[in-house]
Amino acid sequence: MSVNGTPMINYTFTRVPAEQVRQAAEYQAAILADVAGRRGTMHGRIKPISSQMKVAGPAVTVEVRPGDNLAIHAALAIAQPGDVIVVDGKGDLSAALIGEIMSTQAAASGIAGIIIDGAVRDADALSRGHFPVFAAGLNPSGPTKAIAGRVNHPVSVAGVAINPGDLIIGDMDGVVVLPREEVAALLELAQQKLDGENRRIVAIKEGDVRAPWLEKSLRAVGMLNPEESL
């Protein structure tokens, strides 16, 4: 079906390459968020159902009306193994958009995870499982399945613009989105960032506890005079 000639479900788009997904999965979301200029991070309301959950993969984007999950079922039907279903649920918490049944279906289909700016339910079962689910909250009420949505269109989820195929990385800190065409360059910066942080941690443990950039930054904003030291 289409609206004004635009299909509501897009089946074909370019995904971030699998090797880049593998490489990105080795980094914390925080590292990738920093090298991306502190852009692309979802609002902190989006949290994993269990702290050990991590996810990485290309985005299959979904837009739904509040409280209705019909389009999510369509996404489950067409997503490929390794995809991450990312749902613009409008931040609505009045009804859960997925629960144990849909997450079980997604896991059995090889989907890497589901991220929803909305509510989920069956939290006890989801938290004891290994399938990554990230959401804005919980609600025991179930959804309707009666309102048209869109699959694999550009969406805005928890404050972040996402295109189908963009790279999604999520862990206990939250979720970051990297534009597909920028991933290769950002992965190089991520390794440099990680190496620098590891060196700093070693230095702190060896007694160099003061940040080397601190006094310069304090002088730049007028908190220290040019001749003053901490």
Image (cartoon, rainbow, N blue to C red):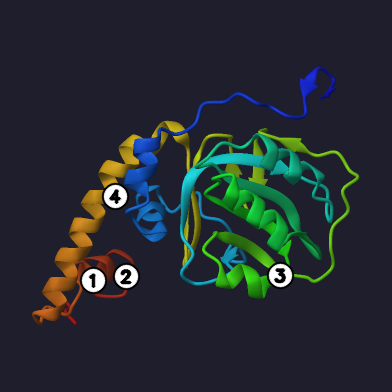
Residue 122's disc number: 3
- Closer to the N terminus: mark 1 or mark 3? 3
Number of numbered discs overlaid on the protein picture? 4
Report the front residue among 55 and 90. 55
Do residues under tags 2 and 4 come within 8 Å of each other at their CB atoms? no
**Compared to 190, does 210 lie above or below?**
below
- Tell me the element at label 1: helix
Q: Disc 2 and disc 1: Cα gap in Å?
A: 12 Å
Residue under label 4, please give it: 190
* Rendered location of residue 23, percent (x, y): 32, 45
- Closer to the N terminus: mark 2 or mark 4? 4
Mark 1: few/some/many CA within 10 Å (<14, 14-19, 20+): few
Residue type at numbered disc 4: Ala
**Compared to 202, does 195 lie above or below?**
above
Q: Decide if residue 3 is in sight here.
A: yes
Q: Disc 2 and disc 3: Cα gap in Å?
A: 53 Å
Do residues under tags 2 and 3 come within 8 Å of each other at their CB atoms? no
Mark 2 or 3: the one toward you:
3
Report the front residue among 53 and 157. 53
Which residue is most to the front? 108
Q: Disc 4 and disc 3: Cα gap in Å?
A: 36 Å
- Closer to the N terminus: mark 4 or mark 1? 4
Residue type at numbered disc 1: Leu
> Which residue does the image show at 26% across and 75% down from the upper left?
224
Residue type at numbered disc 2: Gly
Residue under label 1, please give it: 214
* Rendered location of residue 156, percent (x, y): 66, 45
Report the front residue among 165 and 108. 108
Do residues under tags 4 and 1 come within 8 Å of each other at their CB atoms? no
> Which residue does the image show at 11% across and 78% down from the upper left?
208
Report the front residue among 210 and 168. 168
* Rendered location of residue 127, percent (x, y): 58, 71
